[in-house]
Amino acid sequence: MDTPIGFDVDLDPDLFSLDRLDALYRRGVESGNAGAQAADPGVERNDDPPLIPLQRPLAEEVADRKLQVWFRDLLSWAPEYGESRDRVLEAAGVDRSQQLFNFEVNARIFSPEGPVALHADPESQLNVGMGGRNTWHFSWPSGLSQEEHENLLHGGHFLQWRELEVWQTYDLHAGQGCGAPPRWPHWIEHPGPDPAISFEIGYFTADDVRDRKVWDVNWMLRKSRFVSPRPPRESVRKDRVKHRVFDAISLATRRGSEFRGV
């Protein structure tokens, strides 16, 4: 993907019914792989929303208060969603012959009218509506400053609101999806009377990894008072040096080993 895309996909609706997700929530909450938090107050998130324990069925909880319910790393504890992941990748035209890194397979439920504030993701994303409406508004990565790009993996995932021209809106109903390359800023609405259910896949391509390495090294350079590090793809030579720096730090810290040598 060079720009966001839309696609249709046929997934088993029973896997995404509120009753099924309610049972899944009870399984996942004990291991920390499922939880609930207050919905964002609007298009800007100033503080991390508080976690909220849920006692009643999810259908009642999301109807009575503005919530976001999340299920993360699904395939590690709910492998029945593996076929859905593969169908989404195929529908979105993802080349499975290439190596993909850091797969994340998540699901979320949103109360009606509960927004998700302006943010950007450092990885490629595929998102499928499986209930209600999930309305994604994308703008260009150029709407972020270099510092914001550098901070995405360092606590800067959510962004200060600014008026951004909308490149494309995808109003997803059940079985409709959209995808985006890394770093396209977006915010999400969930209009209508029904809870919105979203099935989401994140991953890095090799190109994503190499860009990420440059942004991460630039973040360290700026912290060291190097005022204007050059962003990815402006200098092949400088990018290669930063790739090696990232790999050396990864080896020393034993972090990010899956990206080493890419």
Image: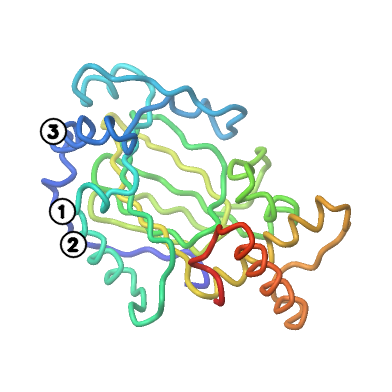
Q: Residue 165 got which mark?
A: none
Inter-mark Cα distance, 3 to 1 = 16 Å
Q: Quadrant of residue 233?
A: bottom right
Residue 17: x and y in percent read 15, 39
Q: Give the camera-side residue of 69 and 6.
A: 69
Q: Quadrant of residue 244?
A: bottom right
Mark 3 residue type: Asp
Q: Residue 19 got which mark?
A: 3
From the image, which quarter does the C terminus lie in?
Answer: bottom right
Between disc 3 and disc 1, the foreground one is: 1
Q: Give the camera-side residue of 225 and 83.
A: 225
Q: Residue 83 got which mark?
A: 2
Q: Residue 80 got which mark?
A: 1
Q: Quadrant of residue 39?
A: top left
Mark 2 residue type: Glu
Residue 248: x and y in percent read 66, 68
Above or below, 227 against 115 in this view is: below
Q: Earlier in the sequence, mark 3 or mark 1?
A: 3
Q: Label 2 near label 1: C-beta < 8 Å?
A: yes
Question: Which residue does the image show at 36% across and 57% down from the upper left?
Answer: 201
Between disc 2 and disc 3, the foreground one is: 2
Question: Which residue does the image show at 62% across and 28% down from the upper left?
Answer: 46
Label 1: which secondary element: helix
Inter-mark Cα distance, 2 to 3 = 20 Å
Above or below, 124 against 232 in this view is: above
